[in-house]
Image (cartoon, rainbow, N blue to C red):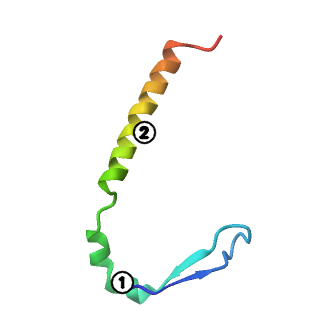
Amino acid sequence: MIKVKNVRNPHYSSAPPALLINREDLERNIEKIRELPKYSDEERERMREYARRSRLRDKLGFLLPEM
């Protein structure tokens, strides 16, 4: 378990709270953290779809210039 604490953001008072993480807990669990997957299958599929649509928008923008 890693101890965390939400505190007021020290740089921007209107920003969301900052998250303080206990360094010793983090160092003790770093190998377990590195083993976690970066993205879920759903997130990977969403990124692929976003990239595909972006390529199509770019291609369409080139084929149909503004008048």
Q: What element carries label 2?
A: helix
Relative vertical location of residue 45 with respect to residue 52 in this rendering, above or below: below
Coordinates of residue 55 in the picture (x, y in percent)? 42, 29
How crowded pointer 2 is (Cα within 10 Å; few <14, some 14-19, many 20+) is rated as few
Q: Name the residue under label 1.
A: 27
Q: Is residue 63 left or right of residue 45?
A: right
Q: What element carries label 1?
A: helix
Q: Name the residue under label 2.
A: 50
Gap in angstroms between the C-alphas marked 2 and 1: 35 Å
Relative vertical location of residue 54 with respect to residue 19 in this rendering, above or below: above
Q: Is residue 63 left or right of residue 49?
A: right
Q: Which residue lies furthest to the front in this view?
A: 42
How crowded pointer 1 is (Cα within 10 Å; few <14, some 14-19, many 20+) is rated as few
Relative vertical location of residue 21 with respect to residue 67 in this rendering, above or below: below
Coordinates of residue 2 in the picture (x, y in percent)? 41, 85
Dividing the picture into quadrants, the one containing residue 14 is bottom right
Dividing the picture into quadrants, the one containing residue 15 is bottom right
Relative vertical location of residue 52 with respect to residue 20 in this rendering, above or below: above
Quarter of the figure with the N terminus = bottom left
Coordinates of residue 49 in the picture (x, y in percent)? 38, 38
Dividing the picture into quadrants, the one containing residue 48 is top left
Q: Is residue 4 left or right of residue 37?
A: right
Q: Which of marks 2 and 1 is nearer the N terminus?
A: 1
Residue found at x 43% / y 32%: 53
Quarter of the figure with the C terminus = top right
Indicate the amino acid at tag 1: Glu
